[in-house]
Amino acid sequence: MTTRQGIIGEHENGSRVVVYGSFDLLHQGHIEFLKAARSNCNWLGAILIPERYVKENKGVLPVHTMNERRCHILGTGIVDAVFVDSLSEGLVSLDAIRPDLFCLGYDQTTIWEEKLEKHLSMRLPCCQIKRLPMYAGGVHSRTLRRAR
């Protein structure tokens, strides 16, 4: 785990929110998504998916390494902590974070979405899932990847 603000839960009167994704080729759509998620809390954690699971879910490896993606997302100043985890590995970071809300992007689909819902209902029944709306610019990583 990489953090900007100390220990998980070291915040007052606010909820914890988690986002999940590869965050490869970080772009304005990601930034707007993170800002929207942040507006729901005063502690935001991001779970980065390891390369092998990005390939399993999207069919391609990320352009950036895990460490580069971690640095990029922390560099936004929007998230408080970054974890590396996956549903295939049990999302153990969720048990440590104990989020109140799990935000998904408008276009975020995963082969593990059903597993995520089951994990949350069994292990963290108070955690809700919220799909955030598309922002006006509508940038998508697939478009950026094709342009490279």
Image: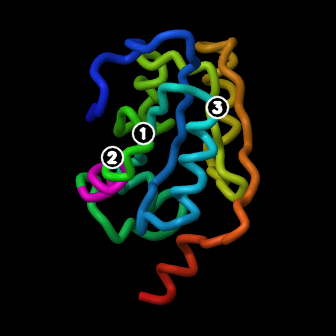
Q: Look at mark 2 in the image and give the residue it sits on.
A: 74
Q: Decide: marks 1, 2 in contact (CB < 8 A)?
A: yes
40 vs 53, left or right, is: right
Q: Which residue is pictured at 42% across the width and 63% down the height?
A: 24
Q: Amino acid at mark 3?
A: Asn
The boundaries of the magenta stretch are 68-74
Q: Decide: marks 3, 1 in contact (CB < 8 A)?
A: no
- Determine crowd level at label 3: few under 14, some 14-19, many 20+ residues with C-alpha closer than 10 A: some
Quarter that holds the N terminus: top left
Q: Regarding mark 1 in the picture, which secondary structure is present there?
A: loop
Q: Look at mark 3 in the image and give the residue it sits on.
A: 40
Sequence-wise, the earlier of marks 1 and 2 is 2
Sequence-wise, the earlier of marks 3 and 1 is 3
Q: Identify the image quadrant of residue 139.
A: bottom right
Q: Amino acid at mark 1?
A: Val
Q: Regarding mark 3 in the picture, which secondary structure is present there?
A: loop
Q: Amino acid at mark 2?
A: Leu
Q: Identify the image quadrant of residue 93.
A: top left
* Residue 92 spot, x, y in % from top left: 42, 23
Q: Which residue is pictured at 42% across the width and 68% down the height?
A: 25
Q: Which mark is residue 79?
A: 1
Determine the main secondary structure of the stretch shown in magenta: helix
